[in-house]
Amino acid sequence: MSTILTRLIYVSRPLGYDPIELDDILRTARDHNARFGITGALISRWDLFLQMLEGAAEPVAETFQRIRRDRRHVEVTLLGTAEVSHRLFPDWQMRDDAAPSWIWPHADVLAGRHLATPFDEVVAMFARIAAERPGP
């Protein structure tokens, strides 16, 4: 019998992109996620955070609410959720990656096109990243 998991993806804008703040976000996320059985990935650059969370529904929802209250994230927008039977990032409490060049150019982010990308296309972006380097 498969366990049903929740996959949640959101996008936000960093409030002043700072590598030290990013390290703190990642350290906090990894500690929190390890305690609550959450895995995922954070794609980051100076104009965008794109994050996938995977795990049991309640801890994922609570984590997302915590992120929405975090002052380091601005304009937090839920791109979608889905019930899934497997994780894309099973070995990562929180994988971090600079946004590859094939993820929305800055002009598209400014124009809000990233917010209109279908959820399945965003999942495919994460799947591509997971395939490039599946584990720590």
Image (cartoon, rainbow, N blue to C red):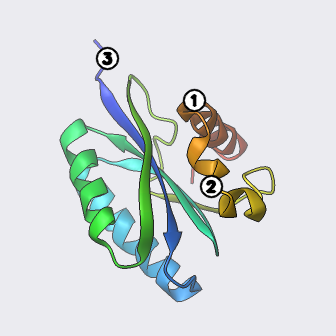
Q: Earlier in the sequence, mark 2 or mark 3?
A: 3
The span from disc 2 to disc 3 (Cα, nearest Å) is: 37 Å
Circle 2 residue: 112
Residue appearing at x 23%, y 57% in the figure: 35
Q: Nearer the viewer, residue 119 or 134?
A: 119
Residue 95 percent location from the top left of the image: 53, 57
Q: Say if 17 sits above or below 9 in the image.
A: below
> Contact (CB < 8 A) between labels 2 and 1?
no
What residue is disc 1 on?
120
First along the sequence among labels 2 and 1: 2
The part of the image, by quadrant, that contains residue 72 is bottom left
Q: SS for tag 2? A: loop
Residue at the spot 27% in from the left edge and 69% down from the top edge: 69
Asked if 93 appears above or below 28 in the picture, the reply is above
Camera-near label (3 vs 1) is 1
Numbered label attached to residue 2: 3
Residue 120 horizontal/vertical position (percent): 57, 29
Dot 1 crowding, Cα within 10 Å, few <14, some 14–19, many 20+: few
In which quadrant is the C terminus drawn? bottom right
In contact (CB < 8 Å): disc 2 and disc 3? no
Q: Position of residue 15 (x, y in %)?
A: 49, 80
Amino acid type assigned to the residue bearing label 3 in the image: Ser
Considering the numbered disc 3 on the image, is that residue within a helix, a strand or a loop? Answer: loop
Residue flagged by tag 1: what amino acid is it? Asp
